[in-house]
């Protein structure tokens, strides 16, 4: 149970970004996980309760809370007594926002014999700074120091996905799943990489597996993208519209625009792309799609007008 709880804290601390319901939940997860690492379970519980107040169906928070309850009631001794004191100190620096000391302490901790956690957290640090090459090197060092340390493989898969190196994602994701076959995040990352690679059937399978484990809006959004790529445009659009209550990002309006464009609903497409542009950071692709939809709408209106004046 202690090993499970430690790994769960580690995963939540560094890897929840792709699937967290919102930034507040993400921040609370980070704080809760850091409290876990320094052994302050009661403080961690307070932040998990805050997450569940925001989102009662958050399975990750509920699972971690269940594990913490067991530790608090059954074993009050910290489950990380064998972890380097420097790693614990680095996590305290992270909690208070002192990034310079956090980095320096983690680097020093990598010199210890039991260094896999130091390398792993160093990988998370570099990833948060988008220093992807350094992050990959750190995760590689973590998995070399301890080959059965699964989170390092998932960290590698996520960094490669963020770098756009989709072919590289599949192997470390599968390696991670060989240790944790019921992890929805790993299946979701695989599905996203496979979709980018044009492996539609594989993406559909892994996406459905992720949804079976954790039916959250983000995975349903992935499902809508897959449906669009498969040509099931009406079904994709319906799903996207149903998700608007949970997700209102530039991407979801972009895909709504693509669906409306494919269905010939040019007026709706113009509105969709306009909303996507408002929520984006000057994405030239969206400007092109907006102009395309606007031109098609004008052409359609002109054709209608010409037909109306014909004798």
Image: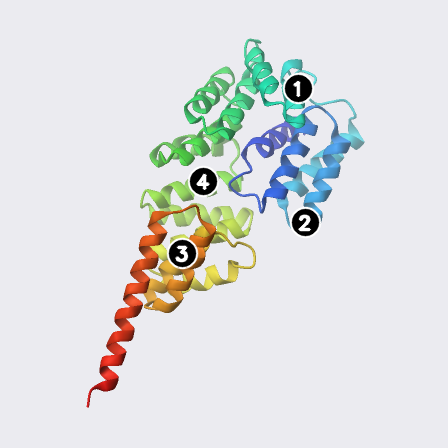
Callout 2 touching callout 3 (CB < 8 Å):
no
What is the number of the mark on residue 255? 3
Secondary structure at badge 4 equals: helix
Locate the C terminus and report the quarter of the image it occupies: bottom left
Specify the quadrant that holds the N terminus: top right
Residue 46 image position (x, y, % from top left):
75, 38
Q: Is residue 165 visible?
A: yes
Q: Is residue 233 above or below residue 57?
A: below
Pointer 1 with pointer 4, Cβ within 8 A: no
Give how far across and how far down residue 262 sits, in percent: 32, 63
- For the point 34% across and 48% down, the residue is 284
How far separated are the C-alphas under marks 1 and 4?
29 Å
Q: Residue 189 carries which label?
A: 4
Marks 4 and 2 sit apart, C-alpha to C-alpha, by: 25 Å
SS type, badge 3:
helix
Residue 220 lies left or right of residue 109; in this view the side is left
Q: Which of marks 1 and 3 is nearer the N terminus?
A: 1
Which is nearer the N-term, disc 4 or disc 2? Answer: 2
Residue that mark 2 sits on: 54
Snapshot quadrant of residue 224: bottom left
**Mark-to-mark CA distance, 2 and 1:** 29 Å
Closer to the observer: label 1 or label 4? 1
**Mark 1 = which residue?**
88
Q: Earlier in the sequence, mark 2 or mark 1?
A: 2
Task: Work out whether 22 lies above or below 74.
Answer: below
């Amino acid at each position: 149970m202690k090993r499970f709880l430690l790994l769960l804290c580690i995963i939540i601390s560094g890897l929840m970004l792709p699937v967290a319901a919102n930034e507040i939940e993400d921040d609370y997860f980070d704080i809760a996980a850091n409290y876990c690492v320094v052994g302050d379970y009661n403080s961690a519980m307070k932040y998990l309760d805050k997450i569940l107040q925001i989102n009662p169906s958050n399975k990750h928070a509920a699972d971690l809370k269940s594990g913490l309850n067991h530790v608090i009631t059954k074993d009050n001794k910290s489950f990380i007594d064998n972890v380097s004191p420097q790693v614990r100190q680095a996590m305290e620096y992270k909690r208070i926002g002192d990034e310079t000391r956090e980095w320096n302490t983690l680097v020093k901790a990598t010199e210890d014999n039991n260094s896999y956690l130091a390398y792993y957290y160093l990988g998370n640090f570099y990833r948060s700074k988008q220093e992807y090459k350094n992050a990959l090197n750190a995760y590689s060092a973590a998995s070399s120091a301890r080959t059965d340390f699964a989170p390092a493989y998932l960290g590698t898969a996520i960094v490669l996905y963020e770098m756009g190196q989709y072919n590289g994602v599949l192997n470390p994701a599968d390696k991670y799943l060989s240790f944790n076959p019921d992890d929805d995040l790993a299946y979701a990352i695989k599905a996203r990489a496979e979709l980018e690679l044009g492996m539609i059937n594989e993406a559909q399978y892994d996406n459905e597996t992720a949804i079976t484990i954790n039916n959250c809006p983000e995975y349903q959004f992935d499902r809508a993208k897959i449906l669009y790529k498969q040509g099931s445009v009406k079904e994709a659009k319906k799903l996207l519209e149903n998700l608007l209550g949970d997700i209102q990002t530039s991407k979801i309006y972009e895909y709504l625009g693509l669906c409306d464009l494919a269905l010939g609903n040019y007026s709706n497409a113009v509105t969709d792309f306009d909303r996507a542009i408002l929520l984006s950071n000057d994405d030239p692709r969206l400007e092109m799609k907006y102009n395309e939809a606007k031109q098609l709408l004008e052409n359609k209106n002109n054709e209608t007008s010409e037909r109306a004046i014909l004798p």
